[in-house]
């Protein structure tokens, strides 16, 4: 999964945990301002736990190890957090506010990065786009030349067979040529 996909899942988790806790408090008639702050703190904890899982998964590349490692790290940090709070002048409430604020900052940062990735890029200057169009025309001509030369297609097929470990189909070779970008410096390619 790409980075924006994981950020979207973490945001959905945050909103889902918060909404569920508020729904539960309203349903049992215990909705107060404290339940809202507690909901934000619990949603922040779930968000930070999902972030920790993503970090461990990225390091280990194994889901089972990531699940066990995240659980172990979460328990270790939960027990050590009491010792850290006791050793500093922080109170438990202030530490919870700091962790919640950190999670909310990460939450907002994820929303901003997702928004930036979804917004279309601005128009390029006209002279830059003209040089890109010329480069594209050169690539199209060279791709067509490569497709029309049977020896080039055969050589490319043999190269792909070595890379992929299997014989590519004709359509796969043609698709590879279609997506091939030929540098301008290698005009004799």
Image (cartoon, grey):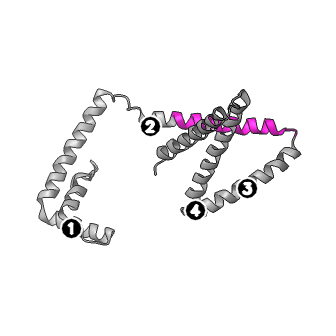
| Residue 155, numbered circle | 1
Q: Which residue is painted at 57% across and 52% down in the image?
A: 54
Q: Which residue is painted at 30% across and 71% down in the image?
A: 162
Q: Main secondary structure of the magenta part?
A: helix
Q: Secondary structure at mark 2?
A: helix
Q: Which of marks 1 and 3 precedes in the sequence?
A: 3
> Which residue position is annotated with label 3?
75
Inspect the magenta stretch and tell me whether residue 23 lies in it: no
The residue lying toward the viewer, choosing from 74 and 162, is 74
The location of residue 62, given as percent across then percent down, is: 55, 63
> Which residue position is annotated with label 4?
60
Q: Which of marks 2 and 4 precedes in the sequence?
A: 4
Q: Which residue is painted at 60% across and 60% down in the image?
A: 66
The residue lying toward the viewer, choosing from 98 and 140, is 98
Which label sits in the foreground, 4 or 3? 3
Which label sits in the foreground, 4 or 1? 4
> Which residue position is annotated with label 2?
117
The crowd level at tag 1 (other Cα within 10 Å; few <14, some 14-19, many 20+) is few
Left/right placement of residue 136 relative to residue 52 reads: left
Which label sits in the foreground, 1 or 2? 2
The location of residue 30, given as percent across then percent down, is: 71, 32
The crowd level at tag 3 (other Cα within 10 Å; few <14, some 14-19, many 20+) is few
Q: Which residues are magenta?
A: 89-112
Q: CA distance from mark 4 to mark 1?
A: 38 Å
């Amino acid at each position: 999964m790409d980075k924006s996909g994981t950020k979207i899942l973490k945001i959905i988790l945050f909103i889902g945990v918060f909404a569920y806790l508020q729904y539960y408090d309203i349903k049992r008639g215990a909705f107060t301002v404290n339940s809202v702050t507690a909901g934000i703190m619990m949603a922040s904890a779930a968000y930070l736990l999902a972030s920790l899982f993503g970090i461990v998964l990225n390091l280990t590349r194994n889901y089972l190890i990531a699940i066990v490692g995240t659980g172990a790290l979460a328990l270790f940090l939960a027990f050590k957090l009491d010792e850290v709070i006791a050793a500093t002048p922080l109170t438990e409430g202030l530490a919870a506010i700091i962790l919640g604020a950190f999670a909310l900052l990460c939450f907002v940062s994820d929303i901003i990065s997702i928004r930036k990735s979804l917004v279309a890029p601005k128009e390029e200057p006209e002279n830059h786009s003209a040089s890109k169009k010329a480069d594209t025309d050169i690539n199209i001509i060279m791709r067509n030349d490569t497709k029309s030369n049977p020896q080039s297609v055969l050589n490319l097929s043999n190269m792909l067979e070595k890379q992929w470990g299997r014989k590519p189909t004709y359509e796969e070779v043609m698709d590879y040529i279609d997506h091939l970008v030929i540098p301008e410096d290698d005009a004799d390619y």
